[in-house]
Amino acid sequence: MTNTQICPKEFVDLALRLAEVARPIAQKYFRSNVAIDDKDDASPVTIADREIEAAMRKLIEAIFPDHGIFGEEYGKTNENAEFVWVLDPIDGTKSFITGKPLFGTLISLTENRKPILGIIDQAINDELWLGAKGLPTMFNGKPATTRSCKALGDAYMYSTSPDLFDREDGTYADFENLRQKTKHTLYGGDCYAYGLVASGHADIVCETGLNAYDFCALIPVVEGAGGSFTDWDGRPLTVDSAGDALALGDASLLGDALAALGS
């Protein structure tokens, strides 16, 4: 097995092409009163989710037929391949279907189950973050950099919703402890919040219960901008991680943030 030090250009080029394929589909269906279906887990899905993933899969299979694919809507293909693309066609479907332009298309490439490339594309705002191993994160073609924040008391934190956290298993209490130690907490950003951390506008994102297609693309974006991305025990995330996510713009906050979360 290889161990890529710098993400190859041909992988970056394909990821950008995937975003180009996805973007017009998202734009076409946004605020168009599309039909909404509920999946088995009660989460919503639309024709936009399905069309985007199908288009991205078709392109990957044409360019790198030996690569695997793991998508939210159509599952896993060749999942044990060395390189596997992890796709979330519309991350933040609830935002999408209610007309809020904070959803995103997430595109990631993993090598031996570890993310080495990630894109957050916001089609309506014309905003794209690109992170790749060994390379600086770019926002719309220019370097993105996290900001300094040395104390939790100065930090602006995002989380998609307090409803993510379970009051019975302790995650709600842990999150609430961290929230009380930060300066302000905002909700509803989905993947967009991680882009805001990468670009130095926010300091923390804390979430739980995520799937690999929710977080794999975010990791190279945040880390390549100078930030830190771990689970709630301070460990790097892989495709197999449980889905507790802690993204920090300033890695010096990690010890205090983990302590607040009970780690």
Image (tube, grey):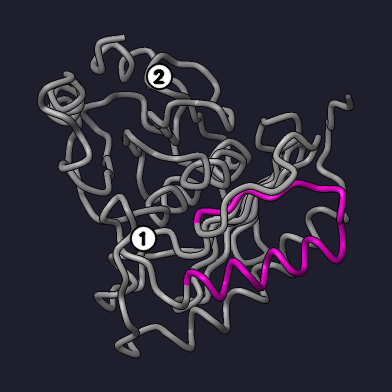
Left or right of 168? Residue 229 is right
Disc 2 residue type?
A: Leu
Q: Tell me which residue sits at (57%, 65%) in the image.
A: 128
**Quarter containing the C terminus:** top left
SS for callout 1 = loop
Q: Tell me which residue sits at (27%, 44%) in the image.
A: 159
**Quarter containing the N terminus:** top right
At label 1, counting other C-alpha atoms closer than 10 Å, the crowd grade (few under 14, some 14-19, many 20 or more) is many
The residue that label 2 is drawn on is 254
Question: Magenta segment range?
Answer: 49-72
Q: Residue 220: where, in percent of width, then height?
A: 62, 41
Q: Residue 72: where, in percent of width, then height?
A: 51, 54
Left or right of 220? Residue 125 is left
The overriding secondary structure of the stretch rendered in magenta is helix
Left or right of 140? Residue 207 is left
Q: Residue 53: where, in percent of width, then height?
A: 59, 66
SS for callout 2 = helix
The residue that label 1 is drawn on is 92
Disc 1 residue type?
A: Gly
Circle nearer the N terminus (1, 2): 1
Q: Residue 95: where, in percent of width, then height?
A: 29, 67
Quarter of the figure with residue 148: top left
